[in-house]
Image (spheres, helix red, strand yellow):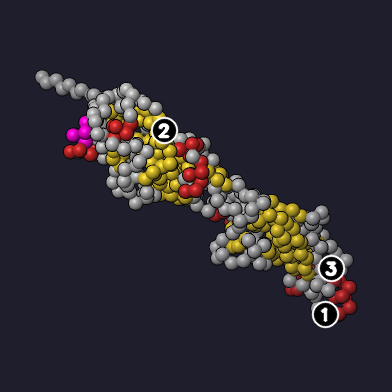
Amino acid sequence: MSVCVQLLFAGTPLAAAEQLITAVFSPDHHNPSHNRFINTTPVAGYCLILPGQCAANGFSSVNFPVDFDAAQALDPQEALADRRKAAYMRVPSNFRNVTITHDQTGQSAQVQWRISGFGGRYILSSGTWHGHLWGSSWVTAPSPCTYGGVGSGNATFYDYFWKVPQSATTACVKLPKVQIPTPFRYRNMNISYELHTPNPLSMEMGTYSGSITYGIGPGQDFDFGDRMVASDDRITFTFKLTVNHLLSLDFAPGAQRAVLQPAQGWQGWLASGRTAPALFADHDFKISSSGRFKVYLECQYAFAQTCGIRTSAQQQLTAGVDIQLSLPAGIALEASGQPARRIPLQAGAHNAVVFKTLSSQFDRKATLHYRVQSASTEQMVKYPGSTFTGNTTIIFDANL
């Protein structure tokens, strides 16, 4: 008889720290060329203290919700022999790609972001002159870090911020000149970052989400050496980008009715004595748009790929109406990038033509062109006095 006993030892994993980054795009009537996201993440830390520094360098800053505590004293001799036992700080400063995905459609895009600086407050166990601890002011950043423009404190703590160049590959290390006993802590940590967002005009309306997770600890993305113990072993930055697009049409009163006639009018055609003419009508309207949209027809009477008109005098006869769309220069065909000039429209969502907005358009002139070919008119004139009618719905749909 044998007995097998299996023991399972489970530790409680540290929960990942989290930080939300948000940005919004909305078209600006006063600035039609506006095509950038606006960062709406609440500012904390460095950029709250020195907003001018951040504005000048294209940075923003947020809390880094992780605390660090020294596991043992920082000793100058040990730190000189092994820099990882000093005040050692290395952060991931290169750009990284983050995929963001539309919450409903699954369309994806890329944002690029990097950590461009970090700071916080170090706290001592007792009061002292800070320069005595490090041989120089803590505000003087060790290479490859650079001066961040802020440094202040009292006898027991010091607030600081250091910038980190994109090219940084090594840690920023402050060597203690005297022994620094525990408790020695880092609190109120915050980071600055650069965020490069995609062109919102090419994105669907809605919210895009994505995230990136960094490891924290020795040998990880955020490495604060061998003396400092982090309150979390990873941090996740979640990105939420919201796209608010505009698509509106403004038709003049009565535009729902298109009266088709020869180019020179019916009287002119009768006077000319020519064969059956083509029939035309144009409707101008105003369009405002900032994103992608598709256009297609829904027909009361179908005729090939377009819509038709009929008369009660001959229900079997359907005359086709070709419908074309011309849009302003700031809107182009998505497939080819060509200008949207007299683009044929077809029936059915599966035949929709997709357009892209190159720059936000506000109250710009557009035109619907209607035409009945002379071959159809030749059949229509066989029923003099008849009226040919048909309902056509032209769908402009921003939900692709």
Residue 381: x, y in percent? 82, 71
Q: Amino acid at mark 1?
A: Arg
User: At numbered mark 1, what does the secondary structure look like: helix, strand or loop?
Assistant: loop
Q: Which residues are magenta?
A: 75-79
Would residue 361 appear left or right of 156 to someone viewing this image?
A: right
Residue at left offset 74%, top offset 58%: 285
Res 353 → quadrant: bottom right
Mark 1 touches mark 3? (CB < 8 Å)? no
Q: Kindly report which numbered mark, 2 or 3, lies closer to the viewer in this rendering.
A: 2
**118 over 360 or under it: above or below:** above
Does the magenta segment cover residue 333?
no
Q: Which residue, given by chain and number where applicable, does mark 2 sit on? A: 152
Q: Which residue, given by chain and number where applicable, does mark 1 sit on? A: 274
Q: Kindly report which numbered mark, 1 or 3, lies closer to the viewer in this rendering.
A: 1
Circle on res. 383? 3
Residue reaching furthest to the left: 1
User: At numbered mark 3, what does the secondary structure look like: helix, strand or loop?
Assistant: loop
- Front position in the image: 58 or 219: 58
1 or 3: tag closer to the N-terminus: 1
Disc 1 from disc 2: Cα separation: 92 Å
Disc 1 from disc 3: Cα separation: 17 Å
Residue 257: x, y in percent? 80, 57
* Label 1 packing within 10 angstroms: few (<14), some (14-19), many (20+): few
Q: Amino acid at mark 2?
A: Ser
User: At numbered mark 2, what does the secondary structure look like: helix, strand or loop?
Assistant: strand
Residue at left offset 82%, top offset 54%: 253
- Front position in the image: 375 or 360: 360
Q: Quadrant of the N terminus?
A: top left
Would residue 2 appear left or right of 324 to someone viewing this image?
A: left
Would residue 117 appear left or right of 315 to someone viewing this image?
A: left
1 or 2: tag closer to the N-terminus: 2
